Every structure is written in C-alpha cells, then in structure tokens.
Image (cartoon, grey):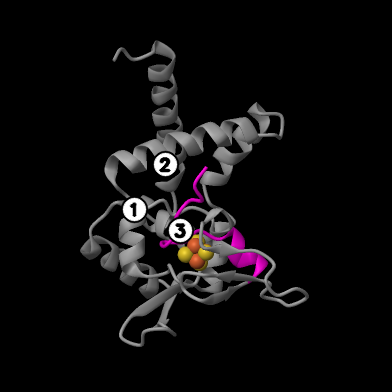
C-alpha cells in the first residue's frame, strides 16, 4: 500500500516536535527518561504507579526503570511505599518537590504552541493523535494506558453524593472524579 506524502510529512513534524520538546529537557538536573517518569506518576492512578507499569508505558526494561526511579528517589522527587493491595509490591508517588518540578516541565512549552496553533480547541487534533496512538499500540501489542473514564470497566455515578461516586468493576474499587481522569495500566477501551 502506497504511503500518502502528507502522512509522511505529518510523521516528520511529530518527530521534529518531539526533538524540540526534548531539547528543553537537557537543561537542568533531570534527563529525558526521568522527566517521563515524573509525568507518568503525575497522570497514573493508584493502581498503576509501579515500576512494571512504568516500564510498559515507556516501552523500556524493568532494570532501566528501577534505576530511573532509584535516582529520582535519591534526589527527593519521588517516594516509595508498600502497595496497599499487595504488600510485596511497591508504589511510587511524586513528592512535593516532584510536583513542583513538573510546573517547569519543558513539555508545557509544546502544549502552549499547540494551544496557539489550534486557537484553543485541540479537539480535532486530539482525536487524530489518539487514533494514531491506538494504531501504533495495536501494532506493538502494547497496553493502551487510556483515561479511566474511557475504560469498559468504568461504572459512572454508582454512588451519588460521595467523594468516590464511580466504581471499577474489574478491580472492585471506588473511583473519584480525579481517578476517572487518570491513566491506568489496566485500562481497556470501551468498544466503539
Ligand atoms: S475502570 Fe478501567 S481504567 Fe479505571 S481503574 Fe478500573 S481497570 Fe483501570
């Protein structure tokens, strides 16, 4: 099947944008993988802040991710604690320093550029990028890591007037509004 020149140009543009965003990551005390780990921990729900999930998300090895998290922990950006559901496993979370650092994330510059280019409404671009990502994940047989509220196990508003109005039918856990927007290692997209 022949490749459309515009599709190829779009791929070059995405590659160039990625490089420009990463150039900003070279400044300061964190390397690109450490930035990606901080971003992931800021976006992931409480079931997904584990080294194995982060390795899957980054398409990296568990050894590399363990070293990245150990380095971030040593510098005070993240902290570990036993998993509440499985005491043999550990979870990581951002510390105050880690959260503060993300307010200076070089990726925010790219987000501002997108906001300018789309006039503040990136809905169409988002839909196309999501579909592109779905195709890439399907080809690599990777996990989706989509937002919780788009998961087929998400049950909305099962308990009204509480802080945890939603529910996960897979893990049998209550979910808050903030949880519903977080990404999850177990997420399975709702069939179209
Ligand atoms: S509903 Fe889906 S995405 Fe949300 S916590 Fe459950 S498995 Fe994860």
Question: In what element is the residue under mark 1?
Answer: helix
Please identify, in this view, whether the residue under mark 3 or under mark 1 is nearer the observer: 3
> Residue 87 in the image: x percent, y percent?
35, 88
Instruction: Report, in whole angstroms, how far the alpha carbon at label 2 lies from the one at label 1.
Output: 15 Å
Sequence order check, earlier mark of 2 and 3: 2
Q: Residue 58 carries which label?
A: 1
Q: 10 Å neighbourhood of mark 1: few (<14), some, or many (≥20)?
A: some
Please identify, in this view, whether the residue under mark 2 or under mark 3 is nearer the observer: 3
> Residue 143 in the image: x percent, y percent?
36, 53
* Number of numbered markers: 3
Q: Name the residue under label 2.
A: 22
Whether disc 3's CB lies below 8 Å from ligand 1 is answered yes
Residue in the picture at 51% in, 74% down: 95
> Residue 99 in the image: x percent, y percent?
56, 65
Sequence order check, earlier mark of 2 and 1: 2
Residue in the picture at 44% in, 22% down: 10
User: Quick check: 165 above or below 126?
Assistant: below
Question: In what element is the residue under mark 2?
Answer: helix
Instruction: Report, in whole angstroms, how far the alpha carbon at label 2 lies from the one at label 3.
Output: 28 Å
Residue in the picture at 55% in, 61% down: 182
* Residue 155 in view, yes or no: yes
User: Quick check: 111 above or below 84?
Assistant: above
* Stretch in magenta: 176-192
Q: Mark 3 points at which residue?
A: 187
């Amino acid at each position: 099947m022949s490749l459309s020149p515009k599709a190829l140009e779009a791929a070059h543009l995405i590659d160039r944008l990625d490089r420009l965003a990463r150039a900003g990551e070279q400044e300061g005390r964190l390397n690109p993988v450490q930035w990606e780990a901080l971003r992931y921990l800021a976006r992931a729900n409480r079931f997904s802040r584990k080294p194995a999930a982060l390795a899957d998300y980054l398409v990296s090895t568990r050894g590399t991710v363990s070293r990245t998290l150990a380095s971030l922990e040593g510098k005070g950006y993240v902290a570990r604690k036993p998993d509440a559901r499985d005491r043999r496993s550990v979870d990581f979370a951002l510390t105050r320093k880690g959260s503060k650092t993300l307010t200076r994330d070089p990726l925010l510059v790219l987000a501002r550029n997108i906001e300018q280019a789309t006039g503040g409404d990136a809905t169409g671009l988002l839909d196309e990028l999501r579909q592109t990502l779905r195709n890439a994940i399907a080809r690599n047989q990777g996990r989706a890591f989509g937002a919780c509220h788009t998961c087929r196990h998400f049950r909305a508003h099962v308990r009204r007037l509480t802080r945890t109005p939603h529910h996960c039918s897979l893990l049998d856990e209550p979910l808050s509004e903030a949880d519903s927007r977080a990404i999850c290692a177990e997420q399975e997209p709702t069939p179209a």
